[in-house]
């Protein structure tokens, strides 16, 4: 459904919402501007059906255990819109006796509320920096009926963020790959490869700001993913709307494994083609879920049931296990080349180069995403593969929904972790532990010698430059942008190696079983269905093993370093940019009638709580 309020929203911010906890009704929307429903008042608690989980996402489970917290979450698009809605929520609690105006329904000792922003753009850290100050000021009023500051916030955010580019450091504010590597060490490479395989991955830790920070930092390692790769990442239906009719499973024939797609069909549709479907191994049954109303172009690929293993089969992915399993890679044969060739009837299209040159993006002919000349971001979070940085307990059914083929999701409730059979991997952030149920998947993800060398290279540069160079966040080698450049180069080389003929030797650097499994994924097949001009300049093989790869990598990293050193692109450090954002908000405060100046607490960075 389309809301009049959404039509009025001319900037990136759709709504400012206040969610409170009622002692009888639970979590509920207390205020929204503009109203979430057309022709409703600002204090109406009515919600669009697609957003019925909003109160539980904005005010997370177990929030009473923390004085304050921050949540990133994704909402499905409303009917008629095809893009994910990005939510950032700042939670606080205050003693009821401190309130100047205490309402009759306040019966508990503490009052818990969240102020959240629903946005069209994934500027998580930037929105968080602005929202934290507003939330603090809103609570300092000690009178929650004073909503004028929230209306002013809506106008200010749309005024300041309108026209904001999704390129540059502001997209990554608050996301620190350095801290991620210091905590997970070589396992960061395992997480990277795990998501490439489109598995069901559950992150678990409390509080929520650590959870969403770790999860989104991993995704920030994929080039272009946060900027352009999450627009289809929240296409699901609430539980009441999910069909339980299993007869749909029988409606898909094996002949639909490969479907040709014409460029004219794509051009006429203006969206990703309906027929593109990842081929499945012959042993796996093919199933289909119900399609979303008003979004029939989004294919719901079959969901793969978790391996039948007891909980005792769960093991921790340990370096010793990885090294022991590495020699077995040679025993696994590469997939037959013709298994991944396009069908004769499927045209191979050439993705046009972006108008802005090397750094430009253009609409993907098949993926529907904004892509660069290398075909990135990969279309991982499409066609029923979800990205849910935080999942409320009320969304638990999505883990086993037949219309959801996989997910990268975060949870703080222990019930999610106990349901291990519903996930392929559980990432326990606190312990930096990855638990994988399926022995075959563990072998597939075994890091090769080249992978371990790459991981050691990252860890060495991060730890050696830890204390001095990065105090102001302006260093390069071992810094956040440097780490992302390394993973970009890793992915470029992996893609190039997968394109080569007679490439078993090249693929051995990444693991023949891994590459074989990856070639069966939706994201690889869509990427492979196009020819991307930028790939002609990429050297195949591990960059750690190839002199030519090192030269290419050095040239690319030099370019990235120059971008980092330019003020317009990413000249400010993460901390500096957050400070600038808060300063801008503080100067805006001075134009409002505020009480005594408020000193904001420092922005919680997820990895800052992670001890190496």
Image: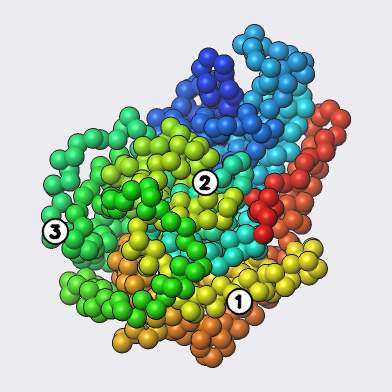
Mark 1 or 3: in front is 1
Q: Residue furthest top?
A: 104
**Spot occupied by residue 166 in the image (x, y as percentages of width and height):** 58, 58
Report which residue position mark 2 lands on.
Answer: 204
Residue 254: assigned label: 3
Marks 1/2: CA–CA distance: 27 Å
Q: Earlier in the sequence, mark 1 or mark 3?
A: 3
Q: How many marks?
A: 3
- 545 or 417: nearer the viewer: 417
Q: Earlier in the sequence, mark 3 or mark 2?
A: 2
Callout 3 crowding tier (Cα within 10 Å): few <14, some 14–19, many ≥20: few
Q: Residue furthest right?
A: 596
Report which residue position mark 1 lands on.
Answer: 457
Callout 2 crowding tier (Cα within 10 Å): few <14, some 14–19, many ≥20: many
Marks 1/3: CA–CA distance: 45 Å
Q: Does residue 609 show up?
A: yes
**Residue 359 falls in image quadrant:** bottom right
């Amino acid at each position: 459904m389309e809301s009049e309020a959404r039509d009025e929203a001319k900037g990136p911010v759709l709504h400012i919402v206040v969610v409170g906890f009622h002692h009888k009704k639970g979590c509920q929307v207390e205020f929204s501007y503009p109203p979430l429903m057309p022709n409703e008042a600002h204090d109406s608690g009515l919600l669009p059906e697609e957003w019925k989980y909003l109160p539980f996402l904005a005010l997370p489970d177990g929030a009473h255990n923390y004085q304050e917290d921050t949540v990133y979450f994704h909402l499905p698009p409303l009917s008629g819109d095809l893009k994910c809605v990005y939510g950032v929520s700042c939670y606080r609690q205050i003693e009821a006796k401190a309130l100047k105006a205490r309402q009759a329904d306040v019966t508990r000792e503490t009052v818990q509320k969240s102020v959240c922003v629903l946005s069209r753009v994934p500027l998580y850290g930037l929105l968080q920096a602005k929202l934290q100050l507003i939330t603090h000021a809103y609570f300092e009023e000690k009178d929650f009926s004073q909503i004028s500051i929230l209306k002013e916030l809506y106008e200010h955010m749309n005024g300041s963020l309108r026209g904001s580019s999704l390129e540059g450091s502001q997209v990554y504010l608050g996301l620190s790959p350095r801290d991620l590597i210091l905590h997970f060490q070589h396992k960061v490479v395992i997480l990277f490869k795990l998501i490439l395989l489109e598995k069901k991955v559950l992150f678990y830790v409390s509080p929520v700001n650590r959870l969403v920070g770790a999860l989104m930092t991993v995704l920030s390692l994929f080039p272009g993913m946060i900027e352009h790769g999450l627009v289809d990442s929240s296409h699901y239906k609430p539980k009441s709307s999910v069909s339980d009719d299993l007869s749909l499973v029988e409606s898909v024939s094996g002949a639909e494994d490969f479907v040709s797609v014409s460029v004219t069909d794509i051009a006429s549709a203006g969206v990703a083609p309906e027929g593109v479907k990842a081929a499945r191994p012959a042993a796996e049954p093919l199933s289909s879920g119900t399609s979303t109303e008003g979004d029939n172009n989004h294919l719901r690929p079959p969901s793969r049931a978790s391996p039948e293993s007891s909980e005792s089969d769960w093991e921790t992915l340990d370096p010793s296990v990885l090294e022991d399993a590495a020699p077995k890679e040679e025993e696994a044969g590469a997939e037959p080349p013709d298994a991944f060739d396009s069908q004769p009837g499927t045209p191979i299209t050439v993705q046009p180069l972006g108008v802005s040159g090397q750094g430009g993006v253009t609409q993907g002919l098949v993926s529907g995403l904004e892509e660069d000349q290398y075909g990135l971001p990969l279309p991982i979070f499409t066609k029923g593969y979800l990205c849910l940085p935080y999942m409320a307990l009320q969304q638990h059914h999505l883990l086993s929904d037949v219309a959801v083929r996989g997910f990268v999701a975060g949870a703080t409730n222990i019930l999610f972790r106990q349901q291990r059979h519903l996930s392929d991997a559980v990432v326990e952030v606190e312990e930096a532990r990855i638990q994988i149920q399926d022995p075959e998947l563990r072998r597939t993800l075994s890091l090769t010698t080249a992978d371990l060398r790459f991981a050691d290279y990252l860890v060495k540069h991060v730890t050696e430059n830890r204390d001095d160079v990065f105090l102001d966040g302006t260093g390069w080698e071992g810094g956040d942008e440097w780490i992302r450049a390394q993973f970009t180069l890793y992915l470029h080389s992996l893609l190039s190696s997968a394109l080569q003929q007679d490439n078993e030797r090249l693929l051995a650097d990444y693991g023949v079983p891994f590459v074989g499994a990856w070639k069966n994924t939706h994201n690889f097949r869509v990427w492979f269905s196009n020819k991307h001009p930028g790939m002609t300049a990429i050297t195949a093989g591990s960059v750690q093993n190839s002199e030519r790869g090192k030269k290419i990598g050095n040239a690319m990293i030099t370019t990235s370093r120059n971008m980092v050193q330019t003020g317009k692109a990413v000249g400010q450090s993460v901390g500096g940019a957050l400070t600038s954002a808060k300063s801008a908000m503080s100067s805006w405060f001075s134009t409002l009638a505020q009480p005594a100046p408020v000193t904001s607490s420092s922005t919680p960075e997820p990895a800052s709580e992670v001890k190496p």
